[in-house]
Amino acid sequence: MKTFKLVSLQLVEENGLIDIQLDDGLIINKEDEKSTWLLEAFIDKSYLEYFKKRADDKDELTIQVVITKKENDPAAFQTKITSISELENHISILFEGSLKRTKNDYAELLLQDLLDKGFIGDSLLDEFKVKMQGKPRLAAAKKKNKETPAQS
């Protein structure tokens, strides 16, 4: 097994990305025959009801994380919530899943984000090149059906 620091966490939804404010996190490559990864996110308790509902519904969640250093490219995982532990002011969520091997996720999400912001033509291309060079976290998108506490 290999363990890494989880630097950022975003949910990938139909309408874009939802930023989850991460207080701390850990990611483990189990290096098993199923290529399983465990991701633990230590976040504010205000997210409890949202993630409880997603766990109760047994939703498969696509999450995008940055591992070890904020400069690293985001990695996408297909996951399920395996446990939620309540602490005093935080919750610890354990996700289990597999790495999605699509290299174009970030580029596609970035392009959609820029299009949504109204970029077109040469300005779209210029902004895309700049953002691909710096790999910034993308702005959170609001989800119509599934509100998170961060969007309230």
Image (cartoon, rainbow, N blue to C red):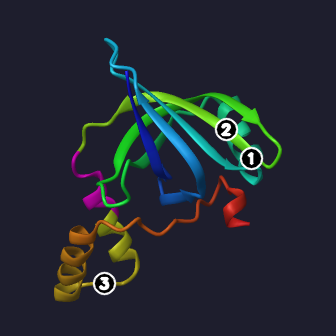
Q: Is residue 54 above or below residue 71?
A: above
Residue 112 position, x and y percent, is 34, 67
Q: Quadrant of residue 135?
A: bottom left
Which residue is the site of mark 2? 92
Specify whether 141 is left or right of 120: right
User: Which region is colored magenta?
Assistant: 103-109
User: Could you say whether the residue bearing mark 2 is in a helix, strand or loop?
Assistant: strand
Residue 152 position, x and y percent, is 74, 66
Specify whether 70 is left or right of 124: right
Q: What is the CA distance from the residue labelled 3 to the residue labelled 1?
A: 38 Å
- Report the predominant secondary structure element of the magenta stretch: helix
**Number of the label disc, if any, that sits on residue 24:** none
Between disc 2 and disc 3, whose residue precedes?
Answer: 2
Which residue is the site of mark 1? 90
Whether residues under marks 2 and 1 lie with C-beta atoms below 8 angstroms apart, the answer is yes
Q: Quadrant of residue 126?
A: bottom left
Q: Is residue 99 part of the magenta span, yes or no? A: no
Which residue is the site of mark 3? 119
- Report the mark closest to the observer, 3 or 1: 1
User: Could you say whether the residue bearing mark 3 is in a helix, strand or loop?
Assistant: loop
Closer-to-camera residue (70/84): 70
The amino acid type of the residue labelled 1 equals His
The amino acid type of the residue labelled 3 equals Phe
Q: Is residue 70 above or below residue 39?
A: below
Specify whether 92 is left or right of 129: right
The amino acid type of the residue labelled 2 equals Ser
